[in-house]
Image: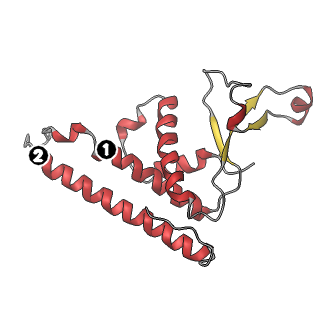
Amino acid sequence: MGTPFEDIYKRAAFKFSDFNFLDFEVELKVEIMHQHLMSAIVDFSRASAIPLTYAIIEEEEPDDADSERGGRRRRRRDGDDDAEKEVPEDKIKQYAFNYDLGFEEQEILALGLVFHWLSGKVLNSELLRNVMHNKDYKSYSPANLLKEMQNLRTNIKAEFTGRINTYTFRNSNLATMRTFRG
């Protein structure tokens, strides 16, 4: 079995702190992280030396043989099988890459997840409103807050693309490399 998406989610969670995000239900948190990871996969797939293909992992109830071995079985299935074997709605779909990713690939994908999460925050209309600070009741300029968020987004994007470029030079044959225009 390859690297579970959960490993990438855990790495990304330590790169940003949004305490409101922690209040979300587990299903919503996983869905949000999943969508941002999908964007990061698209960005990194052309440069990755390892194919970034993935599949759904399902937990199955243990049968007698599994019970003797002491656990649940996991069954993989590719996205093509979704219509035949639907995952119950009350279960969170868990995904894993078809290959084991190294720490560098995991770190790049986590950083890409953070970049796409931050992009959503920068594009949030809530930043355009004045917010009262509890300590001294001063209102802060929404333009300055938005500017700082955009600067942070730009810095994260530069780090993300820089890591992809460094990874590409370390792991690719430059003569056969696909072009990356991100």
Of residues 172 and 71, the one nearer the viewer is 172
**Percent from the top left, x then y, of residue 38?**
52, 46
Of residues 128 and 175, the one nearer the viewer is 175
In the picture, which quadrant includes the C terminus?
Answer: bottom left
Q: Which label sits on residue 10?
A: none
> Circle 1 sits on which residue?
121
Of residues 136 and 61, the one nearer the viewer is 61
Judge left or right: residue 40 versus residue 170: left
Question: How busy is the neighbourhood of tag 2: few (under 14 within 10 Å), some, or many (20 plus)?
Answer: few
> Circle 2 sits on which residue?
140
Judged from this view, the residue extending furthest toward the bottom is: 175
Judge left or right: residue 166 versus residue 126: right
Q: Is residue 64 above or below residue 144?
A: above
Residue at x 59%, y 49% (from the top left corner): 7
Q: Amino acid at mark 1?
A: Lys
Q: Evaluate if marks 2 and 1 touch, with contact meaning CB atoms under 8 Å apart.
A: no
SS class, disc 1: helix
Residue at x 71%, y 50% (from the top left corner): 98
Q: Is residue 153 above or below residue 69?
A: below
Q: How is the model colour-coded? A: secondary structure
Question: How busy is the neighbourhood of tag 1: few (under 14 within 10 Å), some, or many (20 plus)?
Answer: some
**Percent from the top left, x then y, of residue 104?**
58, 65
Q: Amino acid at mark 2?
A: Tyr
Instruction: Judge depth for marks 2 and 1 and give the one in front.
Output: 1
Q: Is residue 83 above or below residue 121?
A: above
Q: CA distance from mark 2 to mark 1?
A: 17 Å
SS class, disc 2: loop
Residue at x 44%, y 65% (from the top left corner): 161
**Percent from the top left, x then y, of residue 125?**
23, 38
Q: Is residue 95 above or below residue 101?
A: above
